[in-house]
Image: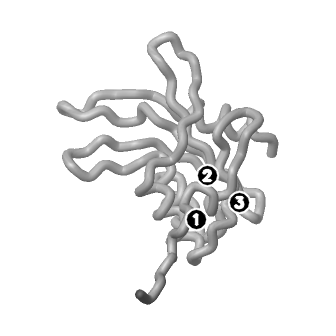
């Protein structure tokens, strides 16, 4: 699947709505697995915790019985409906690594043309040095 197709799939999930004083669904994510399946998710802005769209998509993948993300993207739309690709937060980066059996070979889409490996977004993740 081309990056633009995954970006469009993620953007199609965005449907912001207020639940009490919280905003749900203003970020959408999509991922493709090593088996070619596509899973999506949205963010849930909750008090103090939050649940990012990438985490939601990964949870959908795990619920379906799969466990290997090949490529992932998160998107947001402004008030004009323009779509933006957003980089995963630090919590999502670590979540991706831990739910991918510690492997950092997930391709993270940063724009229509640019992708990076998760390992580039989590440098020195397991760096330990005796002093």
Q: Name the residue under label 2.
A: 39
Which residue is outermost to the right?
2
Q: Which residue is drawn at 45% across and 13% down?
A: 79
Q: What SS does tag 3 mark?
A: strand
Tell us which disc is closer to us: 3 or 2.
3
Q: Quadrant of the C terminus?
A: bottom left
Q: Residue 38: horizontal and vertical position, in percent?
A: 68, 51
Q: Name the residue under label 1.
A: 64
Q: Residue at x 54, y 42 (%)?
A: 87
Q: Residue 46: horizontal and vertical position, in percent?
A: 25, 45
Q: Which residue is drawn at 31% across and 48% down?
A: 50
Q: Looking at the image, tell me whether mark 2 or mark 1 is earlier in sequence order.
A: 2
Q: What SS does tag 2 mark?
A: strand
Colouring of the image: one colour
Q: Residue 52: horizontal and vertical position, in percent?
A: 42, 48
Q: Residue 44: horizontal and vertical position, in percent?
A: 35, 43
Left/right of residue 27 with respect to residue 3 in the rendered view: left
Which residue is outermost to the front?
131
Q: Name the residue under label 3.
A: 70
Confirm or deny contact between disc 2 and disc 1 (CB under 8 A).
yes
Q: Looking at the image, tell me whether mark 3 or mark 2 is earlier in sequence order.
A: 2
Closer-to-camera residue (89/120): 120
Q: Is residue 94 above or below residue 12?
A: below
Alpha carbons under labels 2 and 1: distance apart = 9 Å
């Amino acid at each position: 699947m081309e990056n633009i197709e995954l970006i469009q799939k993620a953007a199609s999930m965005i449907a912001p709505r207020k639940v009490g004083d919280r905003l749900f669904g203003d970020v959408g994510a999509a991922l493709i697995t090593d088996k070619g399946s596509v899973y999506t998710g949205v963010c849930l802005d909750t008090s103090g915790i939050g649940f990012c769209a990438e985490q939601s998509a990964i949870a959908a993948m795990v619920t379906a019985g799969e466990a290997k993300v090949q490529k992932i993207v998160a998107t947001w739309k402004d008030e004009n409906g323009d779509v933006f690709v957003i980089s995963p937060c630090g919590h999502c980066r670590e979540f991706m690594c831990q739910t991918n059996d510690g492997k950092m070979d997930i391709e993270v889409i940063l724009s229509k043309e640019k992708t990076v490996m998760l390992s580039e977004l989590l440098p020195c993740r397991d760096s330990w040095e005796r002093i």
